[in-house]
Image (tube, helix red, strand yellow):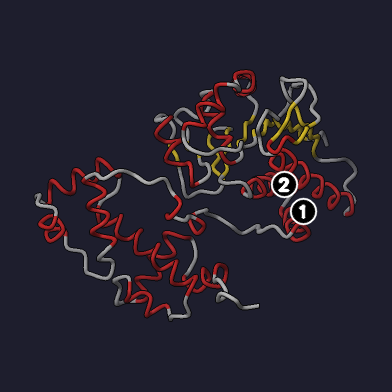
Amino acid sequence: MVPLRISVLAYPGCFASEILGVPDLLTMAMRVAQARGAPDPAYDVRIVSPRRRVLASGDVRIGVAPLRESDVLVVPGFEVGPPVEVDRVLARLGPEVASIRTHAAGGGAVVSLCVGAFLLAEAGVLDRRSATTSWLYADQLARRYPAVDVRADQLVVTDQGVTTTAAFSAMYDFALTLIRRHSGESIARTTARIALVDDARTSQAPYVDESILPAGGSTFADDVKRWLDQHLDAAFDLDRLAGELHVSSRTLHRRFGESVGVTPLEYLQAARVRRARRLLETTGRTVARIAGEVGYQDAASFSRLFRRHTGKAPGEYRSQFRRPPAGSA
């Protein structure tokens, strides 16, 4: 079997672990396959760059090979802070953006890890495609590149030969998906077990922490959100909400939808789920009690809503994310 040629694109400031994480997991998969009698390696992985020398984040020196023809080009993410830094990072990565564009134009598959999606978008390969990235920067990606259909809750999105992944550790979700497709389910499952990698995740929604998302200004939509956040346990009443904001219900619905992209009820449902997640993480209250505290008298209806937003039932979410009491051993 001819090995799948995978090139990982190294560039200044990229996360060193995202350069090495995918190759390392693929190497483990090849060892598993060899132990089961596979005659040839399934993957030919190289770290490449249009530059002769690369310093990754933390000034880690990365050994690189020249760009080559490959089946898959993997683009890692980079260290990023406030939104203005994306402009600064992209401004100095012209050779890398050009390399991505050339590879995609030649028909090769392209993969981004985390905020590496910004490089793909800058190269134009995400135009009119669905994509994901770190939930923390999904809104920024959508604003900067309106031709991209950003799916902020997804872990891995593949659209017409272009794959994007969510934040950091989602590189392993991509690698396992690749192993599963190229080497089979059994090899992927065993590799995940050896590496202690979760091979059953489907969404990054359970990991979103609204408290650290960039704050917005004081707008009409912010006023609506604030009122809804303060009345999570109350039955939704659009007319009452409109009265509190001194507009008609029709005007409220239109203005909020134009600004936020969802209806007031959809926002309220998401806010209720966020509050429920926090209670599941930090308290021992029953699911039925938590449902009541966020406005649902029917625990079954609440559970269905919770699963739709997080991909997990409330009990499953609690088992995975429950935080031990402060000071416990």
Find numbered disc 1 in the image and state the secondary structure of the residue it sits on.
helix
| Residue 104 occupies quadrant | top right
Q: Is 12 placed above or below 235 here?
A: above
Q: Which numbered disc, 1 or 2, marks the residue that appears first in the sequence?
A: 2
Q: Quadrant of the C terminus?
A: bottom right
**Residue type beneath disc 1:** Ile
Q: Position of residue 71 (x, y in %)?
A: 71, 29
Q: Cα distance, mark 1 to mark 2?
A: 7 Å
Mark count: 2
Q: Nearer the viewer, residue 260 or 297?
A: 260
Give the residue pinned by disc 2.
179
The disc at residue 171 is none
Q: Are marks 1 and 2 in contact (CB under 8 Å)?
A: yes
**Residue type beneath disc 2:** Ile
Give the residue pinned by disc 1.
187
| Residue 117 occupies quadrant | top right
Q: Nearer the viewer, residue 316 or 109?
A: 316
* Picture residue at 77% right of the left edge, 45% below the top: 26
Q: Position of residue 253 (x, y in %)?
A: 18, 48
Q: Position of residue 19 (x, y in %)?
A: 72, 38
